[in-house]
Image (cartoon, rainbow, N blue to C red):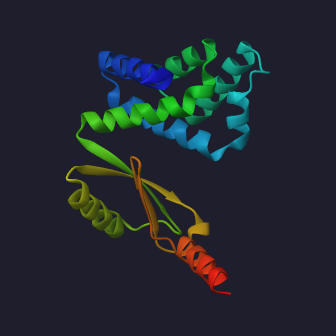
């Protein structure tokens, strides 16, 4: 369970007590995406060189800009006050995984070369539901480096049908022949 799991349980419990589970989940997703997109923010929260006050002010400014709700805001500020910001990404992932599990869902991280249409998302969700036997929530990402196809990860299982990986396998095979 670890540090991230304990903090995730605390946030979920707080969200349930305040009746704000859906808004907290939306806030956590928004903050997770902001964190994933900013290398500077990742360095900032993981650096022990900054003081507690600097961390509090920095994450407070990020949450103001992201218009995060009161429950998630207080929680992140508590994490900062406890000098545990380095674990924030893992805490967010644990919160989302636990909430999905409570709904009987499994989350599939899907990376494609371009944004999937609603029809493609529905077809993918149905195919993954058939494969897993559970409802599937899609966590979509776009990475032009994939070139084509999809990279799908559910828990520890990954299916990489991207054109990039197929080309890499072909390149390795050709090196072995010559």
Q: What is the residue that sits farthest to the front in this orientation?
A: 177
Considering depth in this image, is 163 or 113 the residue closer to the camera? 163
| Quadrant, the C terminus | bottom right
Image x and y of residue 93, in percent: 46, 36
Q: Residue at x 31, y 39 (%)?
A: 100
- The answer to which quarter of the image holds residue 161 is bottom left
| Quadrant, the N terminus | top left
Q: Residue at x 49, y 29 (%)?
A: 91
Q: Does residue 100 lie above or below 139 as drawn?
A: above
Q: Does residue 170 lie above or below 60 as drawn?
A: below
- Relative to 3, is 10 on the left or the right? left
Image x and y of residue 122, in percent: 29, 63
Image x and y of residue 78, in percent: 55, 14
- The answer to which quarter of the image holds residue 46 is top right
- The answer to which quarter of the image holds residue 167 is bottom right
Considering depth in this image, is 1 or 35 the residue closer to the camera? 1
Q: Residue at x 50, y 21 (%)?
A: 3
């Amino acid at each position: 369970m670890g540090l991230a799991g304990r903090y995730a349980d605390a946030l979920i419990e707080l969200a349930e007590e305040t009746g704000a589970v859906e808004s907290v989940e939306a806030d956590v997703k928004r903050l997770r995406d902001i964190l994933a997109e900013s290398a500077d923010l990742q360095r900032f929260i993981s650096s022990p060189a900054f003081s507690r006050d600097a961390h509090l002010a920095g994450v407070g400014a990020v949450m103001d800009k992201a218009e995060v709700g009161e429950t998630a805001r207080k929680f992140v500020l508590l994490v900062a006050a406890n000098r545990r910001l380095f674990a924030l990404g893992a805490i967010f992932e644990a919160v989302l995984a636990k909430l999905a599990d409570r709904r009987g869902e499994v989350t599939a991280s899907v990376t494609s070369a371009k944004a999937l249409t609603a029809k493609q998302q529905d077809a993918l969700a149905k195919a993954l539901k058939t494969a897993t036997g559970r409802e599937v929530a899609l966590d979509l990402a776009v990475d032009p480096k994939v070139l084509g196809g999809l990279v799908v990860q559910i828990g520890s299982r990954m299916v990489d049908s991207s054109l990039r990986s197929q080309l890499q396998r072909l390149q390795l095979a050709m090196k072995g022949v010559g």
